Image (spheres, rainbow, N blue to C red):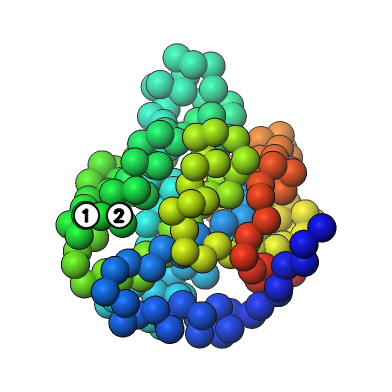
């Protein structure tokens, strides 16, 4: 089994920063299970890299709640089948060839996708793509891997992930018992799926 190098945040930043002067775009995948800190690290990278970098989140491709309800998938929101994977793949491919693009983002407080909420311009050379399923083996997610110049997975223990996910639901208004049940019933199912069905990244950033 091939070995994977572990790197810290500063080493990751250094790897990416080498490509800020490229003529084309450099595509970085930040993946990991729910609660692993993908959005946080992606935001820190952009803050350090400056205006040449931009985050494109996978979460903007959540299917609408009404559609999930019709598909009897609302209780599984956040699972691979509750995303528009084909639409996400199309966007990622377009990023390579099209300078000006708009893309959707997910408003967690409103629990809905906001279409064309953000955009890429010619100044954005480093694209930080973050999401749970960027390295999933299942089609069409599996076609994403060829679009990334660098892939990084965040490694966090299941115990810590359960705590973070429970705290997330508490922050959204659930009581501790309901929050724990929500985290265990759906979120941790997705955690296990990501860990079991993803291909190996180029590097791993270990957190807790």
- Measured as percent of width and height from the top left, residue 12 is found at 55, 78
Which quadrant holds residue 9? bottom right
User: CB atoms at circles 2 and 1 under 8 Å apart?
Assistant: yes
Q: CA distance from mark 2 to mark 1?
A: 5 Å
Per the image, label 1 sits on a secondary structure element best described as loop
- Measured as percent of width and height from the top left, residue 125 is found at 30, 71
Q: Which residue is mark 2?
A: 95
Q: Residues within 10 Å of mark 2 (few under 14, many from 20)?
A: many
State the residue at coordinates (69%, 42%).
197
Q: Which residue is mark 1?
A: 98
Q: Residues within 10 Å of mark 1 (few under 14, many from 20)?
A: few
State the residue at coordinates (39%, 79%).
19
- Measured as percent of width and height from the top left, residue 194 is found at 66, 45
State the residue at coordinates (48%, 51%).
146
Quarter of the image that includes the C terminus? bottom right
Residue 28 relative to residue 142: left or right: left
In this view of the protein, can residue 175 be seen by the observer? Answer: no
- Measured as percent of width and height from the top left, residue 106 is found at 38, 46
Work out whether 33 lies above or below 23: above
| Most foreground residue, 180 or 33 | 33
Quarter of the image that includes the N terminus? bottom right
Per the image, label 2 sits on a secondary structure element best described as helix
Which quadrant holds residue 119? bottom left
């Amino acid at each position: 089994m091939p070995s994977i190098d572990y790197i810290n945040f500063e080493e990751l930043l250094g790897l990416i920063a080498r490509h800020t002067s490229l003529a084309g775009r450099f595509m970085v995948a930040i993946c990991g299970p729910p609660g692993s800190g993908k959005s946080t690290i992606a935001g820190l990278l952009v803050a350090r890299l400056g205006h040449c970098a931009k985050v494109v989140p996978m979460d903007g491709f959540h299917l609408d709640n009404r559609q999930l309800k019709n598909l009897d998938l609302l209780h599984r929101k956040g699972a691979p089948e509750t995303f528009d994977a084909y639409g996400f793949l199309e966007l990622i491919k377009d990023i390579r060839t099209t300078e000006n693009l708009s893309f959707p983002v997910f408003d967690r407080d409103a629990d809905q996708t906001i279409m064309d909420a953000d955009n890429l311009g010619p100044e954005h050379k480093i694209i930080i793509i973050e999401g749970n399923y960027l390295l999933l083996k299942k089609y069409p997610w599996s076609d994403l891997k060829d679009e990334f110049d660098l892939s990084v997975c965040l490694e966090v223990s299941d115990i810590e992930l359960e705590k973070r996910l429970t705290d997330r639901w508490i922050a959204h208004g659930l009581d501790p018992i309901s929050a724990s049940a929500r985290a265990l019933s759906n979120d941790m199912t997705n955690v296990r799926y990501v860990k079991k069905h993803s291909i190996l990244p180029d590097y791993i950033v270990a957190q807790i």
